[in-house]
Every structure is written in structure tokens, then in C-alpha cells.
Image: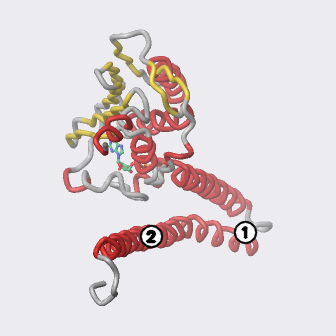
Amino acid sequence: FKKLSLPKSSRDELYIMGKTFNNMMDILRRNFEKQQQFVSDASHELKTPLTVIESYASLLKRWGTKKPEVLEESIEAIHSEAVRMKEMTEQMLMLAQSNEQGDLQEEEVDVVHLVAELSQRLEHAYNRTIKVHKEEENITIVGDCNKLKQLLIILLDNGLKYSEKHLDVSLHKKPKGVTVSVQDYGIGIPQEDQASIFDRFYRVDKARNRKSGGTGLGLAIAKNIVEAHKGTLTFTSVPGEGSTFTIALPFHIKQDMPKKRLKRK
Ligand code: ADP
């Protein structure tokens, strides 16, 4: 910029614009690489059930009409792999929609009511007990009700999937928002896996999770939803003893905006 015969203030401006442009390109490049990685991981994950479906369909074509046992086994396998693919594609869609803060509906949500409703629903579905501990009858925040439902279902569902005892769900009203903890007394998460469990498609035990239908996308979706609401999602886990996942959500998605504006002035 020094070679340009421009006043210093214009050169400074050009320099800042150049820097901003480079930073933007870096962000775009990183996002593009992330997308590429996601497409490659997703294709890989979808290929496994597709391969199973394809091989059973070939078996059916060859033996289906002649061997009833082949017919039965193939239909069963094709059906369960198709269900798995459907769940995976639904979760991929959910993941894509979960990190856009701009897309969030802003509505009043009573978190105590939501937790009670979903706990009851999952208690019936799993035939297990979920104990809800609350200090207040209502804690209202502003957020996207559907996404908060997805978030709570993911954590409750995991708690039930990876344990055999009851769950304890605790709600606390804090000065700036609400915390919800989901505690299970199940298998826990090995220390070496703890850093990766929020990664897309990450499963601690792929073989076991294939049977229980895990996709490895639940916690990635949960983290995106919490972060879109400007909250945090943390956990503690002891293998063989259980895990506690804690969501902290502010009362309002935009509650920290006025402070930022003040600082800039
Ligand atoms: P999945 O669909 O496989 O449950 P998640 O993204 O929800 O995918 O979780 C990622 C992995 O983290 C799971 O496969 C499981 O190994 C581990 N995990 C998640 N929640 C728990 C829990 N409450 N107890 C033990 N392991 C868990």
C-alpha cells in the first residue's frame, strides 16, 4: 500500500479492508472444508446400510421365491436398514437446521413444563422412571420451542439408551437463565472418548450403537441448538457410574446484545 500515492488515512482503510477480506476468505475456506468433510462422512455412513440393502435385495432376486427363510430374513434386514437410513437422513436435516441462529423462532417457553411433558412422554415410551426435581413451578425463557424440545429429547433419550436405571432431571433458576441437568446411572463415557462425543457421527462403541440405532449425530445437534440459543452444554461422566449432561440457557437469546452495544460506544 505504501507504493500507492494515497493519503495515509486511505492507505490505512485499504489495509483494514484487505485484512477483513482475508479473514472472510479464511472463514469461507474453513466452512467449505467442513462441508466437504460432512458430505464425505455422511456418504460413508449412508453407504453401510445401502450396501446391506443391496446385498439382501440380490439374495432375494436369486432365492426369494424358492427359499421362504431367505425371503423372511431379507425383508427383515432391508426393513431395519431402511429405518436406520431414514433416521440418519432425518437427523442430518436436523443438524443442518440446528446451527442457524437467524432461523430461531423467538417464543416464550416454560422450561419446567417442557421438561415435565417430555419426561412423561419418554417414561411411557421406554417404560422407565424419570424423576424431575424442580424448585419453581415455572421458568420461562425466550427461545425456539421446537428446537428446545429436540434438545431435551436427545439428552433424555441418550440417558435412557445408555443406562438401565431411572434418570434424575434437575432444573435450577439462575440470575441469568436456567440450567437443566440430565443425570443417568449407566455405562458412562470412557475418558479417551470424552473430547470427541460432540463430533458429528462419533460413537463410542460403533457395534453396540448400530444395534441400538445410534447415529452419532444427537449430541452434535444438541450442541448446535444450545449454542444458537447462546447457552452452553457441558457434561461429566464416570465410566461404569453414569453421566450428567447440563444445559445452561439464558432467559433471552439476545440478552447480551445491549452490553456489546454499550462497549462499542
Ligand atoms: P448416538 O445417536 O450414537 O447416541 P450421540 O451424538 O447422541 O449419538 O452420542 C454420541 C456418543 O456418545 C454415543 O454413541 C455414546 O457412545 C455416547 N453417549 C452419549 N450420551 C451418553 C450417555 N448418557 N451415556 C453414555 N454414553 C453416551
Residue at 69%, 57% in the rendered image: 75
Residue where numbered disc 2 is placed = 28
Q: Is mark 1 within 8 Å of ligand 1?
A: no
Q: Residue at x 37, y 55 (%)?
A: 203
Which quarter of the picture shows residue 165? top left
Closer-to-camera residue (53/181) = 181
Above or below residue 63? Residue 100 is above
Query: Mark 1 falls on what kind of element?
Result: helix
Q: Quadrant of the C terminus?
A: top left
Q: Residue 60 bears which disc, if any?
A: 1
Element at badge 2? helix
Q: How is the image coloured?
A: secondary structure
What's the residue type where badge 2 is placed? Leu
Work out whether mark 2 precedes mark 1 in sequence or the reverse, and give the earlier one.
2
Depicted 3 relative to depicted 108: above or below: below
Q: Which mark is residue 120?
A: none
Quadrant holding the N terminus: bottom left
